[in-house]
Image: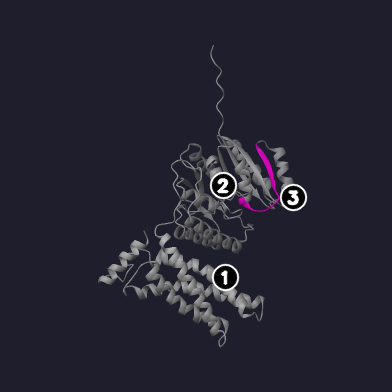
């Protein structure tokens, strides 16, 4: 008697759409997504609307869509946070692949199958849409373009990230891999994506990138300054955790322990000590000069003096460059970091003066500390990725410079980056 063969299980992809007060676009977007997947997607799918504590009619619309459309469900959370929504749904998913996309569907849906296909085949572990590939077609304003490129450059230079676009709201992962990584991801909001990708890459997982066609949503309500600050804090936290040693996660066998980019383990402690001393010197000079000059002038003088000393100290102790060759050029190029610090600190003082006329010296010092924290991150990026980058042909001096000091400086800088 011939046995009955059980039908093969259909592969399942769960697409999460996180929303907060999106009553304007939710209905049209989910119906469009559902129609697209029903008509073209060759695998089983589930669309999960994750409502992040909306206060408008979003939840009512989500439940109506759940009743109206097959393979659509709605989940409600009592707290905001895109990362929180994704964690909630992904951690409980029984799908083969989990994904998410922004509710405005800024990314062309034709990229969805190329996004998940390498995951379903087992070729890759995570997949992201990228707007920064040469063959991506992107329509957005210059402000958001600049912010996006600066953020991803910062990730690649300071964190050693190999992926090109951490912020595109179009990502997917093999469920078993994502669920293994989630316990180590701390962020619950916008940095969630970046932290997940950094953790995955640090453990040797394969990240597939798909160039996408993307049109900016002019009604986007993302708080860019707050999001940028949260991202910087998240990067600092991930760097500290990496220095302490990555957690052992049950990722695929080929995974390896996370590690910092080459040379950074040696450079970070030295840079941190020099930065702390420079900050204290800057504040001390500022307080002294503030007695006889306006705050902006006192800050500029103190910042200039400490910036010169900071660049010289980092040149010698952090990046191992010795000798006179190239010293002037290093100072001039390091002047960009001074300019950034001056812009941030002057802006902070001006904002403080507008918000709190006649602010105390203590308030001014607090404003300078906050500005210096951001400027320090920019300084490290500039010094490591450009000023003392050993890949530059003339790291230790001007072209054609010779002599033992220049040679030693080049060797030291090359060694520092390993």
Q: How crowded is mark 1: few (under 14 residues within 10 Å), some or many (20 or more)?
A: few
**Residues shaded magenta:** 71-83
- Give the residue at mark 1: 370
Instruction: State if disc 2 and disc 1 touch (CB < 8 Å).
Output: no
Disc 2 secondary structure class: helix
Instruction: Tell me which residue sits at (46%, 60%) in the image.
Output: 158
Verify whether residue 77 appears in magenta: yes
Q: In which quarter of the image is the C terminus?
A: bottom left
Horizontal and vertical percent position of residue 94:
60, 37
Quick one: SS at disc 3?
Answer: loop
Q: Where is residue 134 in the image (x, y as percent from the top left)?
A: 45, 53
User: Is residue 401 among what the camera can see?
Assistant: no
Q: Earlier along the polypeptide chain: callout 3 or callout 1? A: 3
Question: Disc 2 designates what residue?
Answer: 182
Mark closest to the chain's N terminus, 2 or 3: 3
Q: How dense is the environment of label 3, judged by Cα within 10 Å: few (below 14), some, or many (20 and up)?
A: few
Who is closer to the viewer here, 243 or 292? Answer: 243
Write the residue at 48% across / 61% down: 154
Q: Outermost residue toward the front?
A: 244
Determine the CA span between mark 1 and mark 2: 31 Å
State the mark number for residue 57. 3
Distance, label 3 to label 1, CA atoms, is 39 Å
Q: Can residue 257 be seen in this view?
A: yes
Q: Residues within 10 Å of mark 2 (few under 14, many from 20)?
A: some
Q: Do the residues labelled 2 and 3 touch (CB within 8 Å)?
A: no
Residue 340 in magenta stretch: no
Label 1's element?
A: helix
At horizontal 51% and vertical 48% (from top left) the residue drawn is 128
Taking the image as shown, residue 270 lies to the left or right of residue 346, namely: left
- Above or below, 354 against 382 in this view is below
Q: Where is residue 397 in the image (x, y as percent from the top left)?
A: 31, 71
Mark 2 and mark 3: Cα distance apart in space: 30 Å
């Amino acid at each position: 008697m011939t046995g009955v063969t059980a039908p093969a299980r259909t592969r399942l992809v769960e697409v999460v759409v996180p929303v907060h007060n999106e009553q304007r676009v939710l209905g049209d977007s989910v119906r469009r997504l559902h129609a697209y997947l029903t008509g073209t997607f060759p695998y089983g799918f589930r669309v999960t609307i994750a409502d992040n504590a909306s206060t408008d009619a979003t939840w009512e619309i989500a439940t109506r869509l759940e009743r109206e459309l097959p393979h659509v469900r709605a989940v409600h959370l009592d707290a905001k946070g895109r990362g929180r929504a994704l964690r909630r749904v992904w951690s409980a998913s029984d799908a083969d692949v989990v994904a998410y996309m922004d509710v405005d569907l800024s990314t062309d849906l034709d990229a969805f199958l190329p996004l998940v296909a390498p995951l379903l085949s087992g070729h890759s572990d995570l997949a992201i849409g990228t707007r920064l590939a040469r063959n991506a077609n992107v329509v957005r304003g210059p402000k958001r373009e600049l912010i996006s490129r600066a953020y991803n450059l910062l990730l690649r230079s300071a964190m050693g990230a190999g992926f090109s676009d951490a912020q595109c709201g179009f990502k997917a992962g093999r469920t078993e891999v994502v669920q293994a990584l989630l316990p180590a991801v701390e962020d619950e909001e916008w940095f969630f994506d970046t932290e997940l990708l950094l953790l995955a890459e640090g453990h040797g997982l394969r990240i597939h990138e798909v160039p996408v066609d993307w049109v900016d949503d002019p009604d986007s309500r993302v708080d860019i300054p707050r999001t940028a600050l949260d991202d910087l804090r998240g990067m600092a936290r991930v760097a500290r955790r990496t220095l302490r040693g990555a957690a052992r996660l049950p990722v695929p066998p080929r995974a390896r322990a996370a590690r910092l980019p080459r040379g950074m383990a040696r450079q970070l402690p030295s840079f941190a000590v020099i930065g702390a001393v420079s900050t204290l010197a800057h504040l001390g000079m500022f307080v002294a000069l503030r007695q006889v000059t306006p705050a902006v002038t006192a800050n500029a003088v103190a910042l200039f003096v400490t910036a010169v000393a900071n660049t010289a100290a980092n040149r010698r102790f952090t990046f191992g460059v010795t000798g006179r060759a190239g010293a002037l050029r290093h100072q001039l190029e390091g002047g960009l970091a001074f300019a950034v610090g001056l812009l941030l600190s002057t802006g902070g003082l001006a904002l403080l003066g507008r918000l709190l006329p006649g602010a105390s010296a203590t308030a001014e010092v607090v404003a300078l500390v906050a500005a210096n924290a951001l400027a320090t991150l920019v300084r490290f990026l500039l010094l490591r990725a450009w000023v003392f980058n050993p890949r530059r042909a003339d790291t230790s001096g001007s072209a054609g410079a010779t002599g033992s000091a220049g040679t030693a400086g080049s060797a030291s800088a090359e060694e520092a980056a390993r």
